[in-house]
Image (spheres, grey):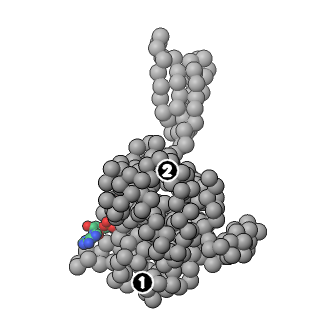
Amino acid sequence: MAHRRLTKPGRETKDALGSLRLQKQGVNMPDVVVVNNLMKKYGQRLAVAGLSFSVGPGQTLGLLGPNGAGKTTTMRMLMGLSRPSSGSISIFGIPLANGLKQVHSRIGVVFEKPNLMENLSAYQNLALSCKLYGQPLSRIQSLLERMDLWSRARDPVRSYSKGMRQRILIIRALIHEPELLFLDEPCSGLDPVSSRIIRDYLLELKRGGITIILTSHDMTEVDELCDQIGFINHGELVVMAEPRELKERFGQSGLKVTFRQDSQISEAVIAPTSENLGWLAGLYAENRVVAVHSMEATLDEIFRKLSDSKLGQQPSDELH
Ligand SMILES: Nc1ncnc2c1ncn2[C@@H]1O[C@H](COP(=O)(O)OP(=O)(O)OP(=O)(O)O)[C@@H](O)[C@H]1O
């Protein structure tokens, strides 16, 4: 099933699709989320130390960082579940300090902990959400089919696996066709099949123009889904950039060289320095090269680099 455009009927063509068209034509649309100098203290502990960033319409931002970096604390403040110690958040141009009421119907939230009604079936859980948001029950079947769960729709949620629960949570967050979706580690601990179903669905939503903010430890997921990556360490935003830009700036591309050594085949991964290229030229001259493959820097490698505390303390204007 093709997911319907994630805006209220009637606004569909004018707002969301129109916005995307305008973006493509180079007309700047207002940011969906604007975060300014956001801080959160737990007693003396500074969990979030002054984050500022914005997310444009239709963008997917991934918040990355090591354990304890402040990602979930940031998400909880964005979701309106936790009050910032200082700083501000505005969503659709409306300050969150005024309460969630004005933006509630336009955002979808997937909490880090499943909070489904265990004794009810997936269908009943989703029917409750439909009633809450004034949505027709007819939406449920197509969403469950899309997430490959229709055959289990009448089973109680307590009999579901973790991956199935997660898919239900995502459907529930989308039942009212929000324009902005928050996901805290959407595929954490899921098998590749469940992760694939969820990621494919998120990619489909992206194509429909939804704005997404997610946290993740999975670099493949972030690389595939995110237009921007915000790397947080010690509660600070170390860098905010496109995945491609991160790889160019912080990654080290390399060459994998397969060559003959004595009567054996050996492999070496080398950085493209002049010394290494000289060594490679020598191998070519001796007709010992079997294959050379270029290797792109991975986000995993960059994650390790950025988690380094010294890099985390670089002045922000060098990195932003
Ligand atoms: N309710 C709380 N009370 C006290 N300290 C907290 C609370 N919640 C989080 N913290 C602290 O705030 C800091 C940031 O935690 P947070 O959960 O935001 O990190 P994270 O980046 O989401 O980590 P992870 O990747 O492990 O989920 C940590 O030092 C954590 O111990």
Which residue in the rendered view is the most extreme toward the top? 263
Name the N-terminal-most of marks 2 and 1: 1
| Residue drawn where x is 47% and y is 25% of the image | 267
Ligand 1 within 8 Å of disc 1? The answer is: no
Q: Nearer the viewer, residue 227 or 172?
A: 172
Ligand 1 within 8 Å of disc 2? The answer is: no
Q: What number is the disc on residue 150? A: 2
Asked if marks 2 and 1 touch (Cβ < 8 Å), the reply is no
Q: Nearer the viewer, residue 21 or 5?
A: 5
Estimate the x, y position of residue 48 in percent, counting from the top left. Answer: 35, 73
Q: Within the displayed image, which quadrant is ligand 1 positioned in? A: bottom left
Estimate the x, y position of residue 130 in percent, counting from the top left. Answer: 49, 69
Q: Nearer the viewer, residue 259 or 213?
A: 213
| Residue drawn where x is 52% and y is 24% of the image | 258
- Is residue 117 among what the camera can see? yes
Specify the amino acid type for callout 2. Answer: Trp
Q: Which secondary structure, mark 2? A: helix
Horizontal side, residue 70 vs residue 147: left or right: left
| Residue drawn where x is 48% and y is 72% of the image | 131
Q: What number is the disc on residue 87? A: 1
Estimate the x, y position of residue 285 in percent, counting from the top left. Answer: 61, 20
- Is residue 238 among what the camera can see? no
Specify the amino acid type for callout 1. Answer: Gly
Estimate the x, y position of residue 296 in percent, counting from the top left. Answer: 55, 43
Q: Residues within 10 Å of mark 1 (few under 14, many from 20)?
A: some
Which residue in the rendered view is the most extreme toward the left? 43
Q: Residues within 10 Å of mark 2 (few under 14, many from 20)?
A: some
| Residue drawn where x is 47% and y is 21% of the image | 266
Q: Is residue 266 above or below residue 231?
A: above
Q: Which secondary structure, mark 1? A: strand
Q: Nearer the viewer, residue 68 or 81?
A: 81
